[in-house]
Image (cartoon, coloured by chain):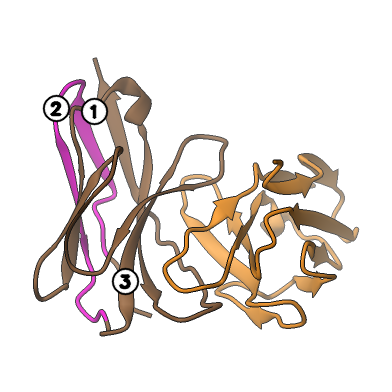
Chain colours: A brown, B orange
Amino acid sequence: LAKTTQPISMDSYEGQEVNITCSHNNIATNDYITWYQQFPSQGPRFIIQGYKTKVTNEVASLFIPADRKSSTLSLPRVSLSDTAVYYCLVVLNQAGTALIFGKGTTLSVSS
Amino acid sequence: NAGVTQTPKFQVLKTGQSMTLQCAQDMNHNSMYWYRQDPGMGLRLIYYSASEGTTDKGEVPNGYNVSRLNKREFSLRLESAAPSQTSVYFCASRTGDPNTEAFFGQGTRLTVV
């Protein structure tokens, strides 16, 4: 599985757009990229996933360049409730595969 | 729809005691996972079960055993608890098909004294 590298922490203010970049230099052809969010004292929850180009849902956007060696999670107009840990995972596109989380990025949003 | 249910939510053990953490899902998922999370750390995979009848080691399997009792249930056993196993334990499940999301339980906070 490809190793991922993310910033340990980020700070932002309410209303700003936040971009968290994840590096995965040795991503394989059959891997896809997925992001999870974890609030304190809760289990992680799925945010978004993609294989290439851009994916958008009601929560976030995911940008993946053509070489797929990195990806960027974009959170538009964050609020205090977006304070959480965000994990970038590279997952093998195969049934029953392991899910390996790194240390994630702790996002702190202030007013 | 309960999703993923973990029991107990809290537990204190003495060093050397044994216990089993229970996990059950009602989503008919094939794959189930056990993680531990230490303060300020990310999640580390202990064991996972790709489908009923199979289990595989994750990143940190030492000191743990698992049982995939049936499709719904996946238990984690500590045979002889150690203070280093003090952690929050999360169970997760997903269909097992490619590109599917995992659903997590609320966690079990375990303290070994």
Chain letter for mark 2: A
User: How much space separates mark 1 and mark 2, taking CA atoms?
Assistant: 6 Å
SS class of the residue under badge 1?
loop
Tell me the element at label 3: strand
Residue that protrudes farthest toward the right in the picture:
B17
Q: Residues within 10 Å of mark 2 (few under 14, many from 20)?
A: few
Looking at numbered disc 3 in the image, what kind of residue is underneath it? Answer: Tyr
Crowd tier of the residue under label 3, counting other residues whose Cα lies within 10 Å: few below 14, some 14–19, many 20 or above: some
**Amino acid, disc 2:** Gln
Q: Position of residue B52 (x, y in %)?
A: 74, 77
Q: Position of residue A31 (x, y in %)?
A: 32, 77
Q: Quadrant of the N terminus of chain A?
A: bottom left
Q: Which residue is mark 1?
A: A78
At 37% from the left and 24% from the top, the residue drawn is A81
Magenta stretch: includes residue A7: yes
Q: CA distance from mark 3 to mark 2?
A: 28 Å
In the image, which is nearer the foreground, mark 3 or mark 2?
Answer: 3
Q: Earlier in the sequence, mark 1 or mark 2?
A: 2
Whether residue A3 is visible here, answered yes or no, is no
User: Which residue is found at the position 33% from the left and 30% from the top?
Assistant: A82
Res B2 quadrant in image? top right
Residue A32 badge: 3
The answer as to whether the residues below labels 3 and 1 share one chain is yes
Asked if the residue at tag 2 contacts the one at tag 1, i.e. Cβ–Cβ closer than 8 Å, the answer is yes
Q: Disc 3 versus disc 1: distance between alpha carbons?
A: 26 Å
The residue indicated by pointer 2 is: A16
What span is colored magenta in the figure? A5-27
Q: Tell me, yes or no, if residue A83 can be seen here.
A: yes
The chain holding disc 3 is A
Q: Residue at x 85, y 66 (%)?
A: B80
Q: Which corner quadrant of the image does residue B81 belong to?
A: bottom right
